[in-house]
């Protein structure tokens, strides 16, 4: 075993790359999927519900991670796209009785399509102006949901949204018990994570990282930066819209409160607290923070205060998010990985 | 004066004003195919602004820019890079620090390695093959600039001089025809300066790439360039062989005054 310096250069003077890290990631992902698949066997009904909520929030969080962690733009429009996906699915299911898979595709697609005309002016802006623009969009979306009473029923919201029907050769079945919902959510979450990994590890993902790092430098290597920023923005909306669609089929109700800043904040906490710009961080974030807020229900009086204090502690302990901290603790951070491999 | 159709890069009457200040004042310049042309002048003489106007980073108030006889005035930077194969470097922003050394090169080569925007989202054997080809090409370039041993290191972790060499290598990835270098030797130690000059010469001789180099290091410019152009207050005051240009009284005066 060749010795290594603190810079991760072995005795041959080579920077060593770790395939081990790649293997570890796949193993970690497989272990997580296995654990989640087995969870309903041991967890209480309430805990299963909390896990479903985590997976519902995982989708818009992945979208936020794409636009912020990879393309470098902080957007507050995620929950608006989530709401648009939810309302689209609810209306389709209630008025036309369309099947679940069609609704979820439509929810994602409509959210993605709405993102394009919003992106045309918004993506001309940079940094804080862009953030303000997306914030404004979320406010407008909520106002429309509240006031377009003939379609959205205003503050009353839409209720009795049909449960998902899975069409099969024998006529299919309706998802109604919580375990079926759980496995549906798990399947959706796995698909979303795989889609996310495919996007960020593609050549396009490399262009997005380049834009985040330095937009002018990215253009100098031939990146049509505006196009990739737009694609990242629309794809982030598709993730959010699909998440909203599942949300409405699970809770069977949707109201304009979904556009409240509370939910947008939760997404930020998941992505920034978990580990922005990483896949594992967002997965960890969505389980940790939903689980945390549920676990704190044992002390309802101080629940939100404790939640806030914990957030502050996390920010101080690991400003890059939880995942980088965890990786460092178990000795597989990229820097160490380079040093350890021989 | 019409642009020289044989010139790799021609600028005609380029003028750029910032408020009351005229940074570039009606410059005409032809960079001939295959030459290494130096561009120098005191601070604030308009060198970088002229670069910016040629590469789409800034829009000139007047004048036109041609690459190989093709009018590229008003094109966006990424289009100039892709279609005219005119590539530039920056003084400060050098590499993508979060990406590995090798990935910096793969990224730079993607514009020729991937046929269209849709293909950049591809997953599967066709994309893997494309990336593998780019990695092989990157390997050769890293050997050339002497960074092969740190190909997997994050680009932000290598020294600034090494980053400049990496930046140079990444400019060669997309098979450019013209390279504009903005102070490639600033902040680089003498050993790496020699290596940088050697790499520029090799790329020029072996691949026929035309170079326009902005640089203050006159010794390096005299050793490297076939031709030297001096800019002062936004206008060309001397143009000729490096030895002759540095002796011209107007150049000496401009440098002392600047």
Image (cartoon, coloured by chain):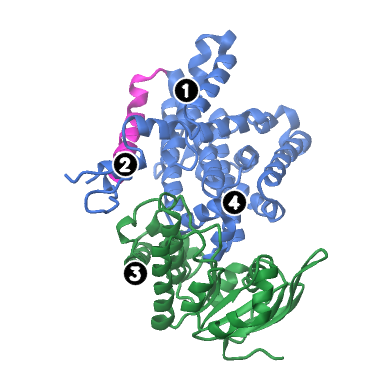
CB of mark 3 within 8 Å of CB of mark 4?
no
Chain for disc number 3: B
Q: Chain of mark 2?
A: A
Distance from disc 2 to disc 1, alpha carbons, whole Å, reads 37 Å
Question: Residue under mark 4: which chain is it in?
Answer: A
Q: What is the spatial separation of the Cα atoms under label 3 and label 4, in whole angstroms?
A: 41 Å
Give the Cα separation between the discs numbered 3 and 2. 26 Å
Q: To which residue does mark 3 refer? A: B144
| Local secondary structure at mark 2 | loop
Q: Secondary structure at mark 4?
A: helix
Q: Which residue is mark 2?
A: A6
Which badge, 4 or 1, is on the more N-terminal residue?
4
- Decide which of B214, B70 is in the foreground and name it: B214
Do marks 4 and 1 share a subunit? yes
Mark 1, chain letter?
A
Pointers 4 and 1 in contact (CB under 8 A)? no
Residues rendered magenta in the picture:
A22-44
Give the x, y percent position of residue A17.
29, 50
Do marks 3 and 4 both belong to one polypeptide chain? no
Q: Which residue is mark 4?
A: A234
Q: Label 1 vs label 3: CA separation?
A: 53 Å
Q: Mark 4 to mark 1: distance in Å?
A: 29 Å
The residue sitting at 46% across, 43% down in the picture is: A192
Q: Quadrant of residue B143?
A: bottom left
Q: Which residue is mark 1?
A: A291
Q: Is residue B203 above or below residue B195?
A: below
In the image: residue B140, left or right of residue A265: left
Helix, strand, or loop for circle 1?
helix
Q: Are marks 3 and 2 on the same chain?
A: no
Look at the picture and state if B69 lies above or below A52.
below
Q: Farthest residue toward the right?
A: B20
């Amino acid at each position: 075993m060749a010795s290594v310096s603190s810079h991760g250069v072995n005795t041959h003077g080579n920077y060593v790359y770790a395939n081990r890290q790649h293997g570890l990631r796949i193993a970690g992902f497989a272990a997580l999927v296995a654990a989640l698949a087995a969870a309903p066997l041991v967890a209480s009904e309430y805990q299963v519900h909390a896990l479903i909520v985590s997976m519902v929030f995982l989708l818009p969080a992945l979208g936020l991670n794409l636009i912020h962690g990879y393309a470098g733009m902080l957007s507050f429009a995620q929950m608006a796209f989530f709401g648009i996906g939810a309302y689209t699915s609810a209306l389709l299911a209630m008025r036309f009785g369309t099947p679940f898979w069609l609704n979820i595709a439509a929810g994602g697609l409509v959210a993605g399509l709405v993102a394009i005309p919003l992106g045309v002016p918004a993506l001309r802006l940079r940094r804080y102006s862009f953030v303000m623009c997306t914030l404004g969009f979320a406010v407008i979306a909520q106002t429309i949901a509240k006031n377009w009473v003939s379609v959205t029923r205003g503050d009353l919201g839409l209720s009795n949204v049909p449960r998902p029907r899975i069409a099969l050769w024998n006529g299919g079945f309706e998802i109604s018990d919580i375990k079926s919902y759980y496995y549906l959510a798990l399947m959706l979450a796995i698909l979303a994570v795989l889609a996310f990994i495919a996007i960020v590890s593609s050549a396009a993902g490399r262009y997005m990282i380049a834009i985040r790092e330095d937009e002018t430098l990215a253009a100098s290597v031939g990146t049509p930066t505006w196009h990739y920023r737009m694609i990242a923005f629309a794809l982030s909306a598709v993730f959010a819209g699909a998440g909203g669609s599942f949300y409405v089929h699970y809770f069977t109700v949707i109201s304009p409160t979904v556009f409240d800043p509370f939910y947008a904040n939760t997404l930020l906490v998941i992505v920034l607290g978990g580990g922005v710009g990483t896949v594992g961080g967002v997965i960890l974030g969505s389980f940790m923070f939903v689980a945390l807020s549920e676990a704190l229900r044992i002390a309802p009086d101080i629940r939100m205060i404790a939640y806030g204090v914990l957030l502050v502690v996390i920010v101080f302990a690991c400003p890059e998010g939880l995942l980088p901290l965890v990786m460092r603790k178990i000795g597989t951070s990229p820097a160490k990985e380079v040093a350890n491999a021989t | 004066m019409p642009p020289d159709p044989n010139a790799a890069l021609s600028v005609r009457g380029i003028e750029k004003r910032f408020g009351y200040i005229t940074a570039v004042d009606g410059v005409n310049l032809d960079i001939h195919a295959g030459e290494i042309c130096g561009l120098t002048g005191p601070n604030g003489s308009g060198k970088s602004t002229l670069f910016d106007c040629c590469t789409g980073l800034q829009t000139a108030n007047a004048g036109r820019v041609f690459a190989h006889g093709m009018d590229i005035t008003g094109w966006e930077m990424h289009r100039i890079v892709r279609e005219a194969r005119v590539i530039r470097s920056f003084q400060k922003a050098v590499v993508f620090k979060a990406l590995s050394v090798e990935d910096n090169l793969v990224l730079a080569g993607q514009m020729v390695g991937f046929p269209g925007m849709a293909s950049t989202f591809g997953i599967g054997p066709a994309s893997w093959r494309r990336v593998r080809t780019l990695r092989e090409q990157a390997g050769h370039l890293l050997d050339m600039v002497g960074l092969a041993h740190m190909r997997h290191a994050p680009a932000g972790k290598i020294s600034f001089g090494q980053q400049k060499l990496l930046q140079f290598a990444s400019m060669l990835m997309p098979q450019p025809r013209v390279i504009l270098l903005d102070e490639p030797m600033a902040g680089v130690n003498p050993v790496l300066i020699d290596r940088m000059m050697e790499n520029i010469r090799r790329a020029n001789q072996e691949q026929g790439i035309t170079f326009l180099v902005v640089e203050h290091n006159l010794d390096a410019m005299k050793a490297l360039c076939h031709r030297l152009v001096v800019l002062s207050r936004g206008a060309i005051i001397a143009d000729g062989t490096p030895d002759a240009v540095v002796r011209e009284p107007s150049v000496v005066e401009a440098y002392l005054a600047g």
